[in-house]
Amino acid sequence: MSSASASCRRASAACRAEWRPSRWFQRALALLAVLAATSILASEAPRPLAWPAALAALAHGARLCLRERARPAHSFVIRGAEVLVDGAPVAGFELRWRGPLAFAAWRDGEGRRRRAAWWPDTLPPALRRELRLAAPPPPAARGRASMAP
């Protein structure tokens, strides 16, 4: 029993996670751009309008892919309630999970809202488990009753 209580009192080690743009997400954006252009061409839209719209959909998809690829990598350090992003403390850090995807949101030093999403190709299972264990607890539910009286 003494070893269990000692381990509970001991502060947990910091979780270090690197974020980088996901290649899977970039491929999904490219595929959606191709499918959008194909669906425009397959519709009954007049051809003089369909071709420019399809080219615009392809160009917009290519712009989104390039913008995602150009996003800078981030370094996360989580020590209990303290979270550092690229070495700077952040406020309002939230980590949400949707299956194997992890979504982080925080406010930087200037008060701007920032977001990052880890896809399975950027977050191996061992680091996923470590991040899940080290993340600060989610905010508490509102004070109102959730059921009718």
Image: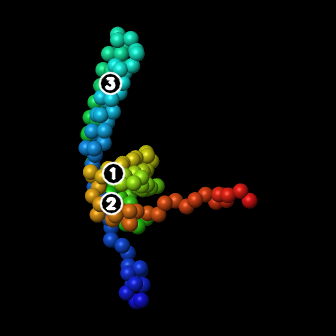
Q: Which label sits on residue 128? A: 2
Q: Which residue is mark 3?
A: 38
For label 3, the SS is helix
Residue drawn at x 43%, y 46% as measured from the top left: 113
Q: Which residue is mark 1?
A: 118
Is residue 39 visible to the viewer in this orientation of the structure?
yes
Above or below for 36 versus 50: below
Looking at the image, which is closer to me, 23 or 95? 23
Residue 127 pos. (x, y %):
29, 62
Of callouts 2 and 3, the N-terminal one:
3
Looking at the image, which is closer to me, 35 or 83? 35
Is residue 91 visible to the viewer in this orientation of the structure?
no
Above or below for 42 versus 116: above
Of callouts 1 and 3, the N-terminal one:
3
Does the CB distance between marks 2 and 1 fall below 8 Å?
yes
Going by the image, does 111 lie left or right of 67? Answer: right
